[in-house]
Amino acid sequence: MQECSIFQVQSYSIHDGPGIRTTVFVKGCPLHCLWCHNPESQNHCPELMWFEEKCAGCGSCATVCKAQAIQMKGKRPLTDRIKCIACGNCEKSCPTEARRVVGEEKTVEDIMKIIQRDAMFYPLSNGGVTVSGGEPLHMPSFTGELLKTCKERGYHTAVETSGYASFQTVEYIMQYTDLVFYDLKALDGILHRRLTGVDNERILKNAEFIKHVLGKEMVIRIPLVEECNATVENIRQTGSFIAGRLGKDVKVQLLLYHNLGTDKERQLGREGITEYTRPSEEKQKRFCEIITDYGLNVQIGGSM
């Protein structure tokens, strides 16, 4: 039975596909987007999050830390992230739930037990199971087995992906996938590498492969971040690619930046955090007009 590091399983999800869904968030991603709203999903290994506003400064975490990574400075616990082995002792001892280890190895069987509790809601709402992340295609053995098991039980399946994977991985995962939410962050390769750390040539080729060779239903999602990719040029390039290379039957969702990721970065103890903003309502309207001019169906937000 395949295992994977999971950082969340969200029941009664309504933004990750049609109907009421169970969304499984895998941990680990080959991209490192500057604005990532789930920074706890980037690294495969477990990580400690500290919620300062909940901390009572009691020092119980320092007392039980197996790696002696926590030192008290007054009533403020300072954690040496290099020493921390994410053993979870501090989380268990904290009386105010100010500490949490994100990422736990789960088998497909473990996840299916959770999914089965939600499955009664799928038929009435035309819902199902969505695998997100992180990057589901980065853990193909686990994701493939999970989706295959869901299909065997008659559940609708969806995947949220950046598309950064080999043709072989894409083909394997897509045979068990009904709907693909596909991120297009920037069409210009140089800009894409600056924003995410990787080139987008493979991503664009995989988008065409999924749509035309594998024949899967696709929804293109474009995250809009004012300081990064929210430009008329990028939206025009993206609209042209979708209409010309994928087809005008592909739906487009514009996802507005939110700053929850910056709070999570602080909770993960990261430094040098940059604050970004979402484009103005005027810009949002202009971007929708541009996408519509290419004959595409576009909406703001991720609801189906």
Image (tube, grey):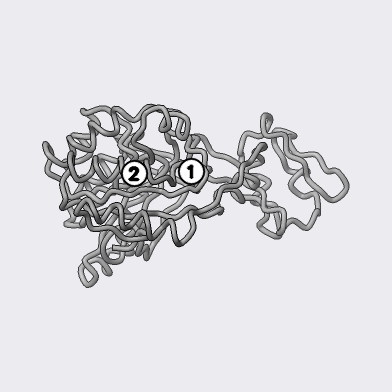
Locate the C terminus and report the quarter of the image it occupies.
bottom left
Residue 295 shown left or right of residue 67 in the figure: left
Q: Are marks 2 and 1 in contact (CB under 8 Å)?
A: no
Question: At which x and y percent is residue 169?
Answer: 24, 31
Q: Amino acid at mark 1?
A: Glu
Provide the residue designation for mark 2. Answer: 183
Does 97 sit above or below residue 170?
Answer: below
| Residue named by callout 1 | 104
Instruction: Point out residue 9 in the picture as x, y percentages from the top left corner.
Output: 41, 54
Q: Position of residue 85 (x, y in %)?
A: 62, 34
Residue 87: percent from left, percent from top: 61, 39
Give the farthest residue toward the bottom.
124
Q: Residue at x 21, y 57 (%)?
A: 155
First along the sequence among labels 2 and 1: 1
Q: Residue at x 48, y 52 (%)?
A: 257
Residue 114, by quadrant, is bottom left
Query: Foreground: 159 or 140?
Result: 159
Q: Out of 283 and 4, give the one closest to the viewer.
A: 283
Identify whether 229 is placed above or below 67: below
